[in-house]
Each structure stands twice: as C-alpha cells, then as structure tokens.
Image (cartoon, rainbow, N blue to C red):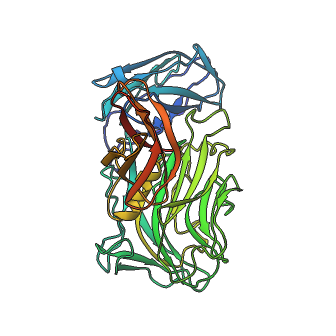
C-alpha cells in the first residue's frame, strides 16, 4: 500500500489538520439534494413542494423515513411512500406539503432524510416556506437615471436584474411615468437586433393561477414586443406561457405555444399608452391538464376570455427557470418602448380589481374581497310596483339585482344590468301592492 504525505489547508505535506475518513463497504452510497422548493399559495391552502435526491454512489440507497424538525416543523408533511429505493446514479423526487393554517409568517424547519447512505445516514436539509396571497412581484420602475437594477417592491424581496445584450443601446431609468402621474418608467431598447430586458433569478415561483399587470408604451423597434415570458428551453415559442404585442398591434397570450386569448389588430399601436392585464384561474392546480379560464384586459376592460383553456405546464427550478420581462430569452430581442408598474399576483384578480389597477395605476390589490357595492338611493315609483335604485358601479361591468324579505332568501329581480359608469340607475318590477318591506342587493354578474 502506497503512502503519501498529508495535505491540509497550508503547504502540501507540511501541516496537520482535521480530516474525515470514510471507509466504504459493500458499495458506496452518497446522497445529494436540491433545496426544497414550494409553489406560492395562500395562507389557507395546502401548498405543494418537492425536493430532488440524487444517489451519486454505485449502490442502491434506500430511504426509510422522512422527518421534519425545528420550530416550523408542524407546518410540513410528506405523503411519500416508503421505503424509497434510489438506484446508483439515479434520482428521486420527494413530494412535500406545506400547510400554513392561516399564517403568513415564515416557517423554518429541517427536512431529515433517513436512509442507509454511508456518508449521510440522516441527511438534514434546512429550509423555509411562506404563504403569499396576492402580490408576488412588483416593479414600479421608479428608480432614478443611472440605476443598475430595478427593485422588487412587493415585500417578498425577489432578486431582479437588468441585462444589456452586447451591441444594444442602453436602457433608460427615470423616464416620465406612463402609469398615472407618479414615479417614473423604464425605457427598454431593442433597436438594432439586440436588446435589454429584466429577469428574475432562477427558481422564481411558478403558480397555477396568476395575474400579470403592466403599463406599456411601445415604440417602433425590431419586431414583436415581448411583455413577459416563461420558457424553459429558450425556444422563443412561449413554451410555458408568454404575452406579446404583435407587429400588427395585437396583444397575444399563449400557453405552451398555443394562442389562448388575443385582441384585435391595432389594439396597442406604437406610441400609445395602455394597461395590459392577463389573468389565469386554475382551481384544481397542476396535474389534471385543465383550468377554469384565461382572460385578457386592456385599459380596465375585459376584451377576451377563453373558458376552454388548459393549465400552464408545471415548472420547477432548473437552470433556466426565470421570469423574463421584455424578452423571450437572454439572447433575443424583445420590448422596445417604455414599461411601468409591472405586477404579478398568484391569484386571479376579478373585473373590479383589474379596474382598480387601471383607475389607480400605482395601487396594489390585496387578496381581499372587493369593496361591497353600495346602493346610494332607492325609492318606490308612483305605481307602487316598481323600484328605482342607484348604486356605485365600475365601467364595463354587468350587474345582478336581487331582493329578499328576510336577508336570508334571495331571488333575482333583474340581470344583465349594464354599467352606466361610476354610478348606475335601474328601474325594476319588484313589488306588488301590500308587499312586506323588501331588502335589495347588487352583485357583479359572472
């Protein structure tokens, strides 16, 4: 048996240090892991997550127990069937669940993987998870001229960077706002076949339901203007999903390369300011290839809806799991023009909430029910069988009027009442002579 001088952290052969010696019998096993990753969900939801284990040895590793320890351990569980065998060189995905039970505080714990691994018989992986209802990312683009990177103002602290491709003109912070009159906007420039863009770090959350909101003022550039995109293979084909303004001025949103909702040509011409919102609702989450609906809003009004849509592909981690803003890939051209108040939510905002973002451009919608509709005036007409009501409303929506004798049992009085703007008045046949007093309410019609 040959021997060689020991080598520590100093000069070779000249120091004494601490060493770990592993003697392997009956084949080596060595587990490595990714960081536990959870999708973003609400405080009252069960949030799905996962960790990937890799056996880098030359013999099968068998997982015999999965435990959680630490202060936040009660919030985590796993329904993984055990024992779980990972062959030499193989990987296994362990499904995890996070149940915050109404809390929005961070939960910190250690995931303990118990196995017959020689090096790590108990592999302890520290991690944390947090429920988020509503805003995931907010980029107001209010940074002054000369800023290096925009800052996430959602409170979640996701790292975001601004990239400039070789040969591209410089982007410009500190431009006049296009979302209302407050703050500033960012000018992205793709003139000349190469551009600049904004992107998140890898591993950015990916949720089954979402809302994207952004103010834009496109100018003539090198082609189609990408607003946002997720694409795991740089296919530039909206492989996960993506939204863009076509050269004909149409807003288009695609899932897995398939057009889901689109506007008419010329809806967003160059040098015009518009508010673009895409919402996607998937109540059942990833896994069954169905979703409830996808909607496209322009300037506070829904202009397209697809109720035969399908779920966005699941998208966990990886070396290209960024959210791209203003481009489809790190090398591609993208948006040319001004961009302001970019917001992402992990819920579907409803019509009134989208209208709020348009009417109050620098506001943020939280995951709370919209303000109740208020009936501001009510009277019975001279004939005694009809009632006149006036109520607060939102332009572009449709309403349902209901009545009740006891505030428990409600019946429809009139439907498809079109909004007349900020205030709507309606006359409806709701009474007969001698009726007991009735109560009325107004709801947004789905």
All told, the count of numbered labels is 0
Up/down of 14 relative to 230, above or below: above
- The picture places residue 69, in percent across and down from the top left corner, at 34, 20
Residue 35 placement, left or right of 1: left
Task: Tell me what residue is drawn at x 66 percent, y 24 percent.
Answer: 87
Residue 362, quarter of the rendered image = bottom left
- The picture places residue 264, in percent across and down from the top left corner, at 66, 69
Point out the residue furthest to the right here: 258
Task: Tell me what residue is drawn at x 60 percent, y 75 percent.
Answer: 333
Is residue 11 among the parts visible in the rendering? yes
Up/down of 84 relative to 379, above or below: above
Task: Tell me what residue is drawn at x 31 percent, y 42 percent.
Answer: 15
Quadrant of the frame with the N terminus: top right
Residue 285 placement, left or right of 384: right
Up/down of 9 relative to 148, above or below: above
Residue 354 placement, left or right of 80: left
Between 430 and 190, the one lying in front of the other is 430
- The picture places residue 258, in percent across and down from the top left corner, at 72, 55
- The picture places residue 111, in percent across and down from the top left corner, at 41, 25
Up/down of 233 relative to 129, above or below: below
Is residue 160 among the parts visible in the rendering? no
């Amino acid at each position: 048996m040959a021997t060689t001088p020991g080598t520590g952290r100093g000069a070779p052969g000249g120091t004494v240090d601490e060493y770990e010696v592993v003697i392997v019998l009956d084949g080596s096993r060595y587990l490595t892991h990714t960081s536990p990753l959870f999708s973003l969900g609400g405080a009252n939801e069960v949030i799905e997550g996962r960790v990937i284990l890799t056996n880098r040895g030359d013999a099968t590793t068998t997982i015999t127990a999965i435990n959680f320890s630490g202060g936040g351990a009660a919030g985590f569980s796993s329904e993984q069937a055990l024992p779980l065998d990972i062959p030499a060189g193989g990987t296994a995905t362990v499904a995890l669940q996070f149940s915050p039970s109404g809390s929005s505080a961070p939960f910190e714990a250690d995931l303990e993987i118990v196995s017959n691994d020689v090096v790590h018989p108990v592999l302890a992986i520290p991690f944390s998870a947090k429920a988020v209802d509503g805003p995931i990312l907010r980029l107001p683009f209010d940074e002054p001229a000369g800023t290096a990177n925009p800052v996430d103002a959602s409170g979640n602290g996701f790292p975001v960077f601004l990239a400039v491709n070789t040969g591209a003109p410089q982007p410009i912070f500190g431009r006049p706002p296009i979302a209302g009159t407050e703050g500033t906007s960012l000018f992205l420039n793709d003139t000349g076949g190469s551009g600049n863009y904004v992107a998140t770090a890898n591993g950015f959350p990916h949720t089954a339901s979402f809302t994207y909101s952004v103010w834009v003022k496109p100018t003539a550039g090198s082609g189609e203007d990408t607003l946002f995109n997720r694409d795991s293979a740089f296919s530039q084909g909206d492989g996960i999903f993506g939204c863009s303004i076509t050269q004909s001025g149409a807003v288009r949103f695609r899932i897995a390369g398939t057009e889901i909702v689109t506007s008419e040509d010329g809806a967003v011409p160059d040098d015009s300011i518009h508010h673009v919102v895409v919402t996607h609702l998937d109540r059942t989450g990833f896994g069954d290839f169905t979703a409830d609906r996808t909607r496209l809003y322009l300037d506070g009004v829904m202009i397209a809806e697809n109720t035969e849509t399908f779920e966005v592909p699941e998208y966990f981690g990886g070396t290209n799991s960024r959210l791209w803003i203003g481009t489809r890939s790190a090398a591609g051209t993208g948006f040319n023009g001004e961009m302001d108040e970019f917001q992402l939510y992990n819920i579907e905002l409803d019509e009134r909430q989208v209208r709020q973002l348009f009417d109050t451009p620098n506001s943020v919608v939280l995951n709370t029910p919209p303000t109740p509709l208020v009936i501001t005036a009510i009277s019975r007409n001279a004939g005694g069988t009809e009632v006149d009501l006036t109520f607060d409303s939102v332009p572009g929506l449709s309403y349902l009027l209901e009545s009740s004798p006891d505030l428990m049992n409600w019946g429809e009085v009139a439907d498809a009442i079109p909004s007349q703007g900020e205030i709507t008045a309606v006359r409806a046949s709701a009474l007969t002579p001698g009726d007991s007093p009735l109560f009325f309410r107004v709801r947004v019609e789905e």
